[in-house]
Image (tube, helix red, strand yellow):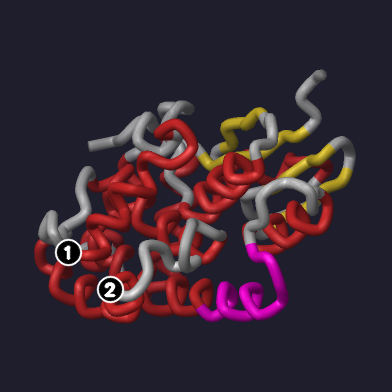
């Protein structure tokens, strides 16, 4: 049966380098569902051409002509469209909890990750994308990328502190989804694999509950994320 699902996935100048946290959330969701799909490496400056300009951001999913963007909306779509495959949420209560984790990760974890590697992200992009990335991010931050990136180790304690809600939860459950991984796990995992893909490591002790969970996430779905290309 031919593959009918296409995922437009952010890439660097090395088109095998896939680092977007939002795209990783969708890759893990598709693998969780056991769906066959193909990815289209897409640079920042190529996004406007995706599916006749249907979205200004990636990920974008084309499921046999049905176009869906935004990682959370894609996950909801996958559960609604393929209810007989393993659930990403299961019921509305999990959807609500996942939205909370999404908002926490994007608002609290991502700014710290930005301080760790924003210039490093720039450096893995093609020249045309570097120009776009520098202009847009420096406008957002009100400072140069060189000033905005203060480093992995300098922000390690802040990241560890910010991850406390996940660490406490993982002290009670093997997964943020409870007995097994759900989209709640893929949200935070997407954020942290972004850091590891670009900066090379997760600055947590090996026995930290989040680090142990992260390693188990790397092994999910035949080691999908463990096999991915890394910049550092």
* Relative image position of residue 7 (x, y in whole percent): 67, 39
Counting residues from the start of the chain, the first of labels 2 and 1 encountered is: 2
**Marks 2/1: CA–CA distance:** 10 Å
Mark 1 sits on what residue?
A: 208
**Which corner quadrant of the image does residue 31 belong to?**
top right
Provide the residue designation for mark 2. 171
- Element carrying mark 1: loop
Dominant SS of magenta comes to helix
Pick the quarter of the image with the C terminus: top left
State the SS at label 2.
loop
Residue positioned 72% across, 55% down in the render: 69
User: Magenta region: which residues?
Assistant: 89-100
- Quarter the N terminus occupies: top right
Check the image and report above or below for 142 versus 147: below
Query: From the viewer's perspective, is the residue at label 2 or at label 1 nearer?
Result: 2
Residue 136 can be seen in this image: no
Q: Badge 1: how crowded within 10 Å, few (<14), some, or many (20+)?
A: few
Instruction: Please name whichever residue, 192 or 54, is drawn nearer the observer in this view of the structure.
Output: 192
Image x and y of residue 66, in percent: 87, 46
Front one among 18 and 209: 209
Quadrant hosting residue 144:
bottom left
Q: Is residue 67 left or right of residue 136?
A: right
């Amino acid at each position: 049966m031919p593959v009918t699902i296409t995922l437009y996935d952010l890439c660097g100048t090395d088109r095998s380098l896939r680092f977007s946290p939002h795209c990783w959330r969708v890759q893990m969701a598709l693998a969780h569902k056991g769906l066959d799909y193909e990815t289209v490496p897409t640079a920042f400056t190529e996004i406007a051409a995706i599916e006749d300009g249907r979205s200004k951001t990636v990920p974008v999913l084309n499921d046999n002509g049905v176009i869906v963007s935004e990682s959370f909306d894609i996950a909801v779509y996958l559960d609604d469209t393929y209810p007989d495959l393993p659930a990403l949420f299961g019921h509305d209560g999990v959807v609500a909890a996942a939205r909370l984790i999404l908002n926490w990760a994007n608002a609290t974890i991502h700014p710290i990750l930005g301080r760790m590697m924003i210039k490093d992200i720039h450096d893995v992009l093609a020249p045309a994308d570097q120009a776009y990335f520098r202009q847009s991010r420096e406008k957002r931050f009100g400072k140069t990328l060189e000033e905005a990136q203060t480093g992995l180790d300098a922000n390690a304690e802040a990241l560890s502190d910010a991850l406390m809600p996940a660490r406490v939860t993982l002290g009670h459950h093997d997964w943020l989804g409870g007995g097994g991984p759900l989209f709640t796990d893929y949200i935070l995992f997407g954020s942290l694999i972004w850091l590891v893909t670009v900066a090379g490591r997760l600055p947590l002790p090996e026995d930290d509950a989040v680090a142990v969970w992260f390693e188990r996430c790397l092994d999910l779905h035949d080691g999908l994320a463990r096999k991915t290309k890394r910049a550092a």
